[in-house]
Amino acid sequence: MTVLEPQTSFEVSNKGFYGSFGGAFIPEMLYPNVEELRRNYLAIMGDPAFQAELQALLTDYVGRPTPLFLAERLSNQVGATVYLKREDLCHTGAHKVNNTVGQILIAKRLNKQRIVAETGAGQHGVATATVCALMGLECIVYMGSIDMKRQQPNVDRMRMLGATVVPATSGSQTLKDATNEAMRHWINNPVDTHYIIGSVVGPHPYPDMVARFQSVISEEIKTQLLAKTGRENPDYVVACVGGGSNAAGAFFHYLHEPSVRLVAAEAAGLGVLSGHSAATTALGKPGVLHGSRTILMQTDDGQVTEPYSISAGLDYPGIGPLHAHLFNSGRGDFYAITDDEAIQAGFQLSKLEGIIPAIETAHALAALPKMNMKPSDVAVVCLSGRGDKDLAIYSKYL
Ligand SMILES: *Cc1c(COP(=O)(O)O)cnc(C)c1O
């Protein structure tokens, strides 16, 4: 993986900003931890020995490079050439492990003995517990007690991997409360604990660090597309956005290629205006969420609105600051995809290509027919995860 130097306005600034979004809006108690990470992450990631260890794990443990697959039957249906970047074939079934593998190596370089993480549906918790088992580090995952009931299989997975799952019993007993309690744990254990955030959100340097770890996705797309088509740039790169880590990884090496349109699919839930939605750019306004200035869904007096999506991974009231900047600057095209559109796209891919996508991923697929592509256009869709975890939901539509 190459670590890019800042080049243009789509790179993070020294203070952690993408345009007017980003930064580190954190309580003073958290400052030493975040500052230790900020001072060290680029030097650690730039160290050849670190890169060698990371590359070996990405190859032999995660299973990279993941294939770039020409989806012929889907292409015929859509009326343009569609390639799928198969992150669903990563170990643990999604892209999240690209980030947790990287961050656990950072934690080791910082001499941390314990990992703390938050999880909503449990996907990031499982990816974190996985790499902690691999490295023999203690793992504590905070999870809302309501989410623990809703996502029992992931709780069992984390426990089987040796993690301690701590129920967050405050507030609405979901992701935001788990985040608060994990932060509190980190504040109280600054010396020996590293906090692994699961997306391109949180205070600087997290959004940039996570984007760099996920950037292996677009690095591989460039090489693979060149080998298959003679050009490394498609016309479109398409990804779903919850916090935005798979999208950031798929976009990263195309941020400065204006001929490549960057397409983000957000979850519209029951409809953008239904009151049950997670379509952040359609509904949100600038504000501070989880340590960075971004776009988030909020009431007129600034209370964070409870999001809704059929897909647990997209059920988040904000987006990472890079995506807020892509939206604000017009560099990215944002589509709001309803639950029903996503479910239909999930069935379509299953029947046309024999690939059952995660419902998160199905949102990206559902954007394809809305993009007015020409027959000569080439689109790469980031197939962020596999759909096995979602069968109980899909089966209601069978
Ligand atoms: C968690 C998850 C997402 C959403 O997270 P991002 O940070 O936006 O990528 C998307 N797809 C899958 C399969 C996930 O597990």
Image (cartoon, rainbow, N blue to C red):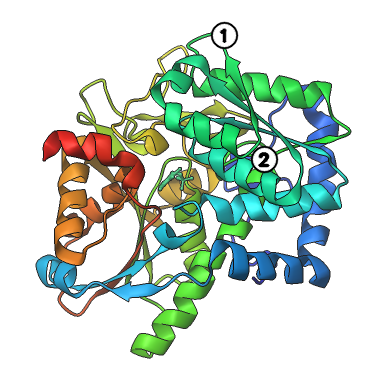
Relative side of 105 to 203, left or right: right
Mark carried by residue 196: 2
**Where residue 212 appears, x then y in whole percent?**
62, 59
| Rendered-image quarter of ligand 1 | top left
The quadrant of the picture occupied by the C terminus is: top left
Locate residue 144, reporting x and y percent: 52, 19
Left or right side of 352 for 183? right
Instruction: Establish if 160 lies above or below 54.
Output: above
Q: Is the C-beta of the residue carrying label 2 under 8 Å from the nearest atom of ligand 1?
A: no
Identified at 62% across, 36% down, the residue is 202
Residue shown at 12%/71% (left/top)?
A: 79
In this rendering, position of residue 375 left or right of residue 275: left
Res 5 quadrant in image: bottom right
Q: Would you say residue 4 is visible in this rendering?
A: no
Q: Amino acid at mark 2?
A: Ile
Q: With respect to residue 37, does 259 lie above or below?
A: below
Q: Residue at x 78, y 65 (%)?
A: 50
Cα distance, mark 2 to mark 1?
A: 21 Å
Percent from the top left, x then y, of residue 105?
A: 75, 54
The quarter of the picture where residue 313 lies is top left
Q: In this orientation, which residue lies closer to the viewer: 379 or 15? A: 379
* Mark 2 and mark 1 residues within 8 Å of each other at the beta carbon: no
First in sequence, mark 2 or 1: give its number.
Answer: 1
Would you say residue 213 is visible in this rendering? yes
Residue on which disc 1 sits: 170
For the residue labelled by badge 1, is the local secondary structure a helix, a strand or a loop? loop
**Mark 1 closeness class: few <14, some 14–19, many ≥20 residues within 10 Å:** some
